[in-house]
Image (cartoon, rainbow, N blue to C red):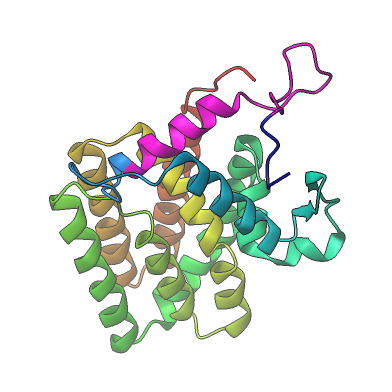
Amino acid sequence: MGIMSSSYAGPTSGDHGAPRNLTRDVKETLLGWIRDGSYPAGTQLPSVPDLVREALQALVGMNLVEIRAGLGCFVRPVSPDMFVNPDLMAALLDMETLIQVAEARRVIEGGVASVAAVTATAEDFEEMEAILFRIEKVSRKNQPMYTITPGFHVAVAHATHNPVLEEVVASFNTLMKQAGSVIEREHVGIAYRVEEYQSHLRLFEILQSRDPERARSEMEAHITKTIDALRNVPREPR
């Protein structure tokens, strides 16, 4: 028997605690690749066996799945030490937890922006501006930006010159990308992406004004939009 037995039909609708429909999940993954340009028109998609094999090997590498020779694949228990791995955390989080993480970010990053408005140097603003330029570039081309925008937030935290604050915000990096990916799958039009750029630009300009309270308020408003967007993502029945 190989990685997956040909006789395995997956959990039935009557199974207790049956997971989400795998066909739908694979479809959503493929749609995401097509939407974000990973597979442009005319590109050949990987074969289904290759997709399954690579996915399982990735899960083995994350220590979430083990392959037992002659038996198949089995889910491993999640040990406490796994939760220090942000990439693993992002893979395990459900929508409600992503929202809770964003709510925590709103509290923390509001204060970070308030400090950065006072402590940022010219070099810090240059770093933020360079990231803003990249965000503007992809927004005008209507391309995904969720891998770029978290860097702006880390740059703001860096401008506090407080290593602890910077590390805390940087620890959200993978989770910010995860949330951004979810939102951009729903809001794929250029209008959303241009508004995202403009929101980061407003934040940058307020930081430059050296007004800590306005900076706090703008950062909190900025992240509130993320929270609202996550809450508006349609929930498919499990």
Question: What residue is drawn where x is 42% and y is 43%?
Answer: 47
Position of residue 85 in the picture relative to residue 159 (left or right): right
Does residue 106 appear anywhere in the picture?
no
Quadrant of residue 125 within the rendered picture = bottom left
On the image, the x and y values in percent for residue 216 come to 46, 59
Most extreme residue toward the left, as rendered? 140
Residue in front for this viewpoint, 83 or 102: 83
Give the residues drawn in magenta, as a range: 7-33
In the rendered image, the vertical position of residue 165 relative to residue 195, given as above or below? below
Position of residue 15 in the picture relative to residue 114 (left or right): right
In the rendered image, the vertical position of residue 142 relative to residue 210, given as above or below? above
Residue in front for this viewpoint, 74 or 163: 74
Does residue 9 appear anywhere in the picture?
yes
Question: What residue is drawn where x is 48% and y is 23%?
Answer: 234
Q: Find out whether residue 34 is within the magenta segment.
A: no
On the image, the x and y values in percent for residue 182 come to 45, 40
Most extreme residue toward the front, as rendered? 1
Quadrant of residue 133 within the rendered picture = bottom left
Count the marks. Answer: 0
The N terminus - image quarter: top right
In the rendered image, the vertical position of residue 118 relative to residue 195, given as above or below? below
Question: What residue is drawn where x is 42% and y is 78%?
Answer: 118
On the image, the x and y values in percent for residue 94 come to 64, 39
The C terminus - image quarter: top right
Question: What residue is drawn where x is 46% and y is 27%?
Answer: 232
Most extreme residue toward the top, as rendered? 14
On the image, the x and y values in percent for residue 23 come to 53, 26
